[in-house]
Amino acid sequence: MLLLEAFQAGLSWECVLNKRRVYLDYMKNPYTSEMAKQKVLDLAARKRIVEENENAIFVSIHMNSFPDARYSGLTVYYSENTPESFEIAEYLRKDVVTLLQPNNNRVLKPGGNIYLLKRAACPAILVECGFVSNPEECALLSTEEYRQRLSFVIYSSLSSNLSGN
């Protein structure tokens, strides 16, 4: 079973892209205690979903942001708890370079400090689809055509990898 989890489930892409402003505001004004409490509850609920589904592969999909706007490109983090996590992440990274971002030289990153990846007993990856803090990439992520291509690459890569092709 493949468990796909999108950043801020239920929000539209436009809302996700608008998180850029919120993220930068958080950099100046850290989470309130109520926001921190909600985040802990949200992470616990997502962890429970992963644990309740045997033989799952967990894929968490997000947008990245960083105070320095020069960074761009899809980044994949993997759980160090299973060797399959690294294999799935590497397969996806190669497909992204081949099919979508030929100049992407971002390396795979261990997700040891990411709550869900650190605690996942099943294969698990986190995909940062791009940097909304980079104006060019944010504009690209705002287009329906690019989002469709991005979705296709992620889906086809995972499908091929899971079917053994």
Image (tube, grey):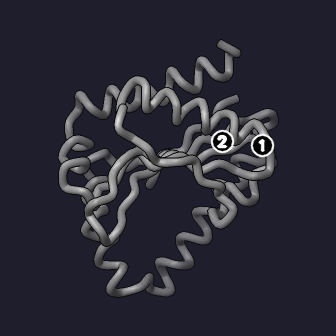
Q: Amino acid at mark 1?
A: Cys
User: Where is residue 12 drawn, in percent x and y?
Assistant: 31, 46
User: Where is residue 114 drawn, in percent x and y?
Assistant: 63, 63
Within 10 Å of disc 2 (Cα), the crowding (few <14, some 14-19, many 20+) is: many
Asked whether the beta carbons under mark 1 and mark 2 sit within 8 Å of each other, the answer is yes
Q: Residue at x 69, y 41 (%)?
A: 86
Which quadrant of the structure image shows residue 102?
top left
Q: Nearer the viewer, residue 33 or 96?
A: 96
- Separation of residues labelled 1 and 2 (CA atoms): 7 Å
Within 10 Å of disc 1 (Cα), the crowding (few <14, some 14-19, many 20+) is: many
Q: Amino acid at mark 2?
A: Phe
User: Sequence order check: which comes first, mark 1 or mark 2?
Assistant: 2
Please state, as top left, top right, bottom left or bottom right, where the C terminus lies in the image: top right
User: Where is residue 87 drawn, in percent x and y?
Assistant: 69, 34
**Residue 107 in the figure: left or right of residue 30:** right
Dot 1 corresponds to which residue? Answer: 122
User: Where is residue 31 drawn, in percent x and y?
Assistant: 44, 82
**Residue 78 in the figure: left or right of residue 14:** right
Q: Residue at x 43, y 25 (%)?
A: 98
**Residue 65 in the figure: left or right of residue 160:** left
Q: Residue at x 77, y 43 (%)?
A: 122
Where disc 2 sits, the SS reads: strand
Q: Nearer the viewer, residue 33 or 158?
A: 158
Mark seen at residue 68? none
Residue 9 seen in this snapshot:
no
Q: Nearer the viewer, residue 154 or 8?
A: 154
Q: Residue at x 61, y 71 (%)?
A: 40
Dot 2 corresponds to which residue? Answer: 58
Where disc 1 sits, the SS reads: loop
